[in-house]
Amino acid sequence: MDYEFKKNTLDGTYHAIFSMGHEALGRWLVEEVGKDFTRMDEVVTQLGALKNSTQEWRWVGDELTLILQDNEALVQANYLFSEDDTELEDNMDFYDEEAMSLCGFEDLALVIEAWRAFVTRF
């Protein structure tokens, strides 16, 4: 998983650009975590507590949810949890590749550590 963090010097916004398949993780960092070090600590604590466990822990944000279970972290857009029965025409499908990311606990811990270091500098 490759990623890059940037800060827009004009408006002060943060950006987290992740490789294909992990875009939702970048959105989660920017939109749900931001510079909230307490939330970062909470997630890292849960990663340690749930390592090699079958228990599940969820953090439901405004737009994205983080689910920790079975040593995997899933970031998923909240709209994917909806039971909307919207029908699409034949041969059509919803594009949700950027709405879900999956990674291991160790990778998520490293990403959070790198994000914390990045936002601390600014």
Image (tube, rainbow, N blue to C red):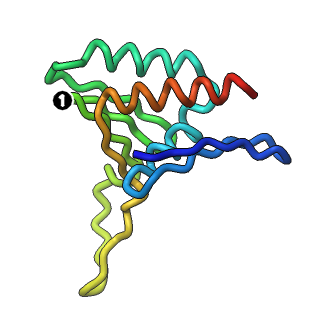
Q: Quadrant of the N terminus?
A: top left
User: Is 86 or 45 nearer to us in this picture?
Assistant: 45
Residue depicted at x 72% and y 42%: 7
* Residue 98 spot, x, y in % from top left: 42, 58
The local secondary structure at tag 1 comes to loop
Q: Which residue is mark 1?
A: 70
Q: Residue furthest front?
A: 2
User: Is 57 or 40 nearer to us in this picture?
Assistant: 40
Residues packed near mark 1 inside 10 Å, few (<14), some (14 to 19) or many (20 plus):
some
Q: Amino acid at mark 1?
A: Asp
Q: Is residue 85 above or below residue 51?
A: below
Q: Quadrant of residue 97?
A: bottom left
Q: Is residue 41 above or below residue 25?
A: above
* Residue 114 spot, x, y in % from top left: 54, 28
Q: Quadrant of the C terminus?
A: top right
Q: Residue furthest right?
A: 10
Residue depicted at x 51% and y 21%: 39
Residue depicted at x 33% and y 27%: 106
Q: Quadrant of residue 96?
A: bottom left
